[in-house]
Image (tube, coloured by chain):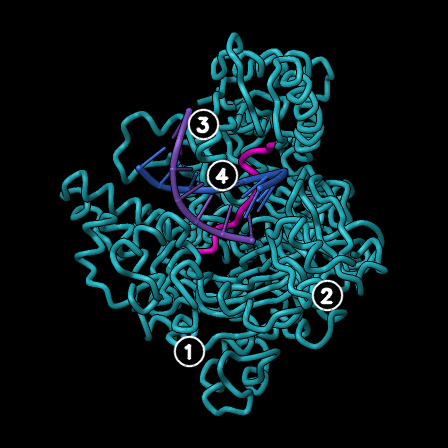
Chain colours: A cyan, B blue, C purple
DNA sequence: TGGGGTCCT
DNA sequence: AGGACCC
């Protein structure tokens, strides 16, 4: 639609094979729904215009642009599919509360769920009010820079932000006040409407006699535990109650890249080989742009089995030899033939070609993506980063220490990946895109929430990225002001002085772009001219952890998170402010104190695209600080618990925490559960970039 | 009923 | 390797 505005006013459906995967609102008004068969759709609406949508390239690229744009405001952005993003805007809200007059904290942008804006109670939640203004600005920015429209929800958790984002549909935003949680949960027509309750879970719940959200809310937990186990049971019941303590975990670069095609029938080896080659060919291209080296190749098939399940796939995977992996990364086209050979071996492990077979789908996937290393021995690089700068605050030091350990400890494992994609739909530009607008849902989780529900929900930790490292700012225009280009973000555990001692090319490498697939996009150019000089104390202050700058733009720009008041007034002001960027070294301390005492604020922003729906949620939570478990848990006591109980708890905490994951091989060496570094920082985009430069083998 | 993804077991 | 979830 964006590419072809003429389609805007006509019923439009995006077709993938035999179904309409999504459609615009014109078509919806005519009775079309998502995932409707093309035949049914045509029957209902003969004048329906169809656009093929099997190729996700444009959608994916646009999706990442949206995510990157949001990250330029604050790095705590978590993707959910191609058209939704959750964003933890707690920091941004706090900053505005400090910097703007109180009178600014009591008006809402957009709708307030179940309230009249004139309702007095609305005034009791200044953070949500400020969050609604931020959401409006984010949507406006996405619209002006990318031409996309969408919805947003502002609430205190991802769950709530997501739910509320869809309450006013096309291109609108809604804020959910804590006192309306019961209402919104009660408004859901069934358990399947609760995010996190899928088909299987809904069936099992139904077997227990549970159909409505209220049924689940009131069901005895003990009975639920019998069916699902303690952890799942509690999570399910909490979801029904509108309680979601999971953190917004920065998504970072994708963990895998795959390409697939489905068809009616494929029954010869030659056809399979050809299809495998086609799939690998396009994947290779994407992989090369990504820049990382895949360590694993996977082939997945779906067999036709008349009676039952068309679903159910089978897969086989194998390691990719280093020499081939390097060809992939370098773009050497010889890799294709070698990969086809490997894939066919995997195929023969699953399918006995001496007898008839009938496939309906093939999928090729690269996973275990490994960031590449700088051309220097790792040992030497790693040693550069062990020195610490004298000027950190204590609190930040602690975080950094922890981070360093976890990062270094995991270097041997596979580095995670960083960034993810974007894609949204566009509403108005030029040519071929189909996806709808972008919805955004922000959610804010202020202390009010802790008061309401769980007092200590706030204790989660943000091991992940810092909050304020900046995003990429988009274009040069924005980066004009003095001072903007001088301070690249370095990971908190990297001493700027030491960094400066590195050869320039190594410095550049360390600071090079993180979003390979979108590297050519509008958001990424500032990289090259940037010169790293120092890290910003303010960054450290905010971040609980790493601030690696992977993205080009981040180098030249200060963290948008720190926008000041001026941000408030106009977009232009905001940019200016960003550049001028002031650092406040002591904010960290301040923040920490807040965290501990009370308050966990979360904002979540969910975006939904106009036709489809995508959402962006903002959430944030402050946590205690750094170790592997909640601050209120005594490690000693924990260690005395039975191993099984330890595992259960860890599994639960893990979900709540934004831990970067570096998954690793090192995790196998019997570390105590507490030490489990298995998950370290892979998720944060920032961390990821840096990690790419360390070889896997080093550990 | 598509073409992606994520994480957990 | 499969299964659950999400879009």
Q: CA distance from mark 2 to mark 4?
A: 42 Å
Disc 1: which residue: A180
Q: Please tell me whether mark 4 or mark 1 is closer to you in this view.
A: 1
Relative to A226, is A510 above or below? Answer: above
Residue corresponding to mark 4: A682
Q: Residue at x 49, y 39 (%)?
A: A682
The image shows residue A506 at horizontal and vertical percentages of 66, 30
Left or right placement of residue A506 versus residue A306 in this view = right
Q: Are marks 4 and 1 on the same chain?
A: yes
| CA neighbours of label 2 inside 10 A, class few (<14), some (14 to 19), many (20+) | some
Of callouts 1 and 2, the N-terminal one: 2
- Tally of numbered discs: 4
Marks 3 and 2 sit apart, C-alpha to C-alpha, by 50 Å
- What segment is highlighted magenta in the picture? A247-259
**What is the quadrant of residue A339 in the picture?**
top right
Q: Is residue A304 magenta?
A: no
How far across and how far down the image is residue A482, in percent?
A: 77, 59
User: Quarter-wise, where is residue A118 in the image?
Assistant: bottom right
Separation of disc 1 and disc 3 at Cα? 45 Å
N-term-proximal mark, 2 vs 4: 2
Q: Is residue A664 visible?
A: yes
Left or right? Give the position of A422 relative to A394: right
- Residue shown at 50% from the left, 18% from the top: A318
Q: Main secondary structure of the magenta part?
A: loop
| Badge 4: chain ID | A
Q: Chain of mark 2?
A: A
Q: Is residue A383 above or below residue A178?
A: above
Residue at the disc numbered 2? A26
Q: Which residue is mark 3?
A: A413
Q: Secondary structure at mark 1?
A: helix
Compute the Cα span from label 1 to label 2. 31 Å
């Amino acid at each position: 639609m964006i590419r072809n505005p003429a389609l805007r006013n006509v019923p439009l459906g995006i077709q993938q094979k035999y179904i309409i995967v999504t459609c615009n609102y014109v078509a919806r008004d005519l009775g079309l729904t998502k995932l409707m068969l093309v035949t049914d759709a045509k029957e209902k609406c003969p004048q329906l215009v169809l656009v093929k949508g099997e190729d996700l390239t444009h959608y994916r690229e646009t999706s990442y642009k949206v995510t990157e744009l949001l990250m330029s405001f604050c790095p705590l952005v978590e993707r959910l599919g191609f058209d939704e993003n959750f964003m933890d805007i707690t920091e941004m809200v706090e900053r505005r509360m400090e910097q703007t007059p109180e009178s600014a904290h009591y008006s809402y942008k957009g709708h307030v769920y179940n309230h009249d804006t004139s309702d007095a109670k609305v005034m009791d939640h200044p953070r949500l009010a400020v969050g609604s203004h931020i959401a409006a600005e984010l949507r406006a920015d996405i619209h002006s820079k990318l031409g996309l429209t969408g919805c947003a929800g502002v609430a205190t958790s991802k769950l709530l932000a997501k739910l509320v984002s869809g309450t006013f549909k096309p291109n609108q935003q809604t804020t959910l006040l804590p006192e309306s949680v019961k209402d919104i949960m009660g408004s859901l027509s069934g358990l399947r409407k609760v995010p996190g309750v899928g088909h299987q879970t809904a069936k099992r719940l139904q077997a227990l006699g549970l159909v409505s959200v209220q049924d689940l809310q009131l069901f005895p937990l003990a009975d639920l535990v019998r069916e699902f186990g303690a952890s799942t049971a509690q999570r399910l019941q909490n979801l029904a109650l509108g309680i979601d303590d999971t953190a917004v975990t920065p998504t970072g670069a994708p963990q895998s890249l795959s390409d697939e095609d489905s068809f009616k029938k494929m029954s010869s080896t030659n056809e399979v080989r050809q299809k495998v080659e086609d799939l690998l060919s396009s994947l290779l291209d994407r992989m090369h742009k990504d820049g990382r080296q895949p360590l694993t190749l996977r082939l997945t098939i779906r067999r036709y089995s008349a009676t039952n399940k068309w679903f159910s796939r089978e897969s086989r995977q194998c390691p990719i030899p280093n020499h081939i992996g390097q060809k992939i990364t370098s773009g050497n086209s010889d890799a294709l033939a070698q990969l086809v050979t490997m894939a066919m071996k995997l195929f023969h492990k699953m399918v006995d070609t001496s007898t008839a077979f009938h496939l309906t789908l093939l999928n090729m996937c690269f996973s275990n993506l490994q960031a590449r290393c700088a051309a220097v021995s790792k040992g030497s690089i790693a040693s550069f980063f062990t020195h610490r700068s004298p000027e950190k605050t204590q609190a930040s030091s602690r975080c950094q220490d922890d981070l360093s350990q976890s990062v270094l400890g995991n270097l041997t494992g596979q580095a995670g990946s960083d960034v993810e994609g974007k894609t949204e739909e566009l509403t108005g530009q030029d040519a071929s895109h189909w996806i709808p607008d972008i919805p955004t849902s922000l959610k804010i989780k202020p202390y009010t929430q802790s008061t309401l529900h769980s007092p200590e929900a706030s204790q989660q930790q943000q091991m992940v990225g810092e909050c304020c490292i900046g995003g990429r700012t988009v274009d040069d225009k924005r980066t004009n002001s003095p001072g903007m280009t001088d301070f690249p973000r370095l990971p908190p555990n990297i001493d700027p002085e030491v960094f400066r001692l590195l050869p320039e090319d190594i410095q550049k490498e360390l600071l090079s772009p993180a979003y390979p697939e979108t590297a050519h996009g509008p958001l990424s150019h500032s990289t090259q001219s940037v010169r790293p000089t120092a890290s910003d104390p303010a960054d450290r202050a905010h971040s609980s952890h790493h601030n690696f700058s992977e993205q080009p733009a981040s180098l030249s720009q200060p963290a948008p998170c720190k926008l000041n008041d001026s941000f408030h007034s106009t977009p232009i002001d905001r940019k200016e402010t960003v550049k001028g960027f002031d650092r406040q070294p002591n904010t960290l301390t301040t923040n920490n104190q807040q965290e501990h005492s009370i308050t966990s604020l979360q904002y979540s922003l969910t975006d939904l695209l106009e036709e489809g729906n995508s959402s962006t949620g903002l959430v944030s939570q402050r946590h205690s600080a750094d170790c592997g478990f909640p601050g209120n848990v005594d490690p000693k006591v924990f260690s005395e618990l039975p191993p099984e109980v330890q595992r259960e708890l860890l599994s639960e905490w893990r979900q709540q925490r934004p831990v970067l994951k570096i998954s690793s091989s090192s995790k196998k060496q019997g570390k105590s559960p507490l030490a489990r570094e298995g998950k370290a920082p892979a998720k944060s985009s920032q961390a990821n970039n840096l990690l790419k430069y360390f070889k896997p083998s080093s550990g």
